[in-house]
Amino acid sequence: MMTTTAIPMNRSNFPKRMELLVSVRSIDEALQAVDQPIDILDFKEPRLGALAPVEVSIWHEAVKRLAGASGVASVPLSAALGERDTAAKLAGGVPAQFSFAKAGPYGCVTPDELTQLWTDVRTSLPNQVELVAVAYADSVAAQSLSPEEVLRLAHQFGFRRLLIDTYVKDGRSSMDHLHDKRLREIRRQCNELSIVWMLAGSMREQDLLAKFDSDFWPDGFGVRGDVCQLGRASELSPDRIRQWRRRLDTSRRGLRTEPNLNRSSF
């Protein structure tokens, strides 16, 4: 069983703005996205599932093209490893220059199954790459633990970051599945436990407009479909990325006026 100890967080080093993660599926998309005002560049294949991985060769090409001789890309790089059937096998192929990796919890219906997945993946990942806990907002469809249960386990096993996504891509977002009350409680617990959290899963800018003054906004948002021209499997739109950044920066939560929320997101 995983025995990671919780790591104290130095809040003074965290950026004040809400962070924006953008998912890409190719080097061409990565080169487009990295020139935009994003905070994390995430590699996944949106046509094959929620956290479907790209070819391993793309990870290494990304390091070559984006990190160069310095070995450090201009934005942190993240790799989706798929679900429990592929995650541990692929984890060893993640370049050490990546900052994050994440594995989908599909089929993990007990705490022991999920912590075993985390253990297997963490054992294979390079030490420099941080494993991010993932929960599915539509946990019943994903045959997985609820976000609240994943959050509790993540804290117990020393995770510093949590991503909430949707497993089924049917147009419903994480907000649609969890609603205000649950999101508010998740936010409260994350703040209390010093876990940074990001909300992904069919997120739309119109959701932000509708919840502009919400008291459950996360530390960041992960987007794909809403920054593409015609849905998540189509080409990226730099204009849409910039529009999302402006929306986050002008929101009450994005401005980070509350000191206890000045935490870096995944």
Image: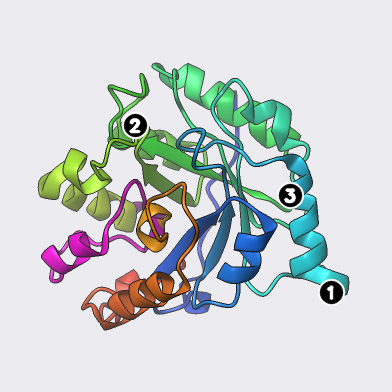
For label 1, the residue is: 70
For label 3, the residue is: 58
Q: Given the image, on which type of amino acid does mark 3 rest? A: Ile
- Whether residue 187 sits left or right of residue 87 in the image: it is left
Does residue 174 sit above or below 64 in this rendering?
Answer: above
Locate residue 209, reporting x and y percent: 16, 68
Which of the numbered marks, if any, corresponds to residue 168?
Answer: 2
Viewer can see residue 236: yes
* Colour theme: rainbow
Mark closest to the chain's N terminus, 1 or 2:
1
Residue depicted at 65% across the width and 57% down the height: 99
Locate residue 76, reporting x and y percent: 62, 65
Viewer can see residue 259: no
Mark closest to the chain's N terminus, 3 or 1:
3
User: Magenta segment, which residues?
Assistant: 193-222
Label 2 residue SS: loop
Residue depicted at 23% across the width and 77% down the height: 251
Locate residue 45, reporting x and y percent: 56, 42
Label 1 residue SS: helix
From the viewer's perspective, is the residue at label 3 or at label 1 nearer? 3
Residue depicted at 55% across the width and 36% down the height: 52
The answer to whether the residues at label 3 and label 1 have Cβ atoms under 8 Å apart is: no
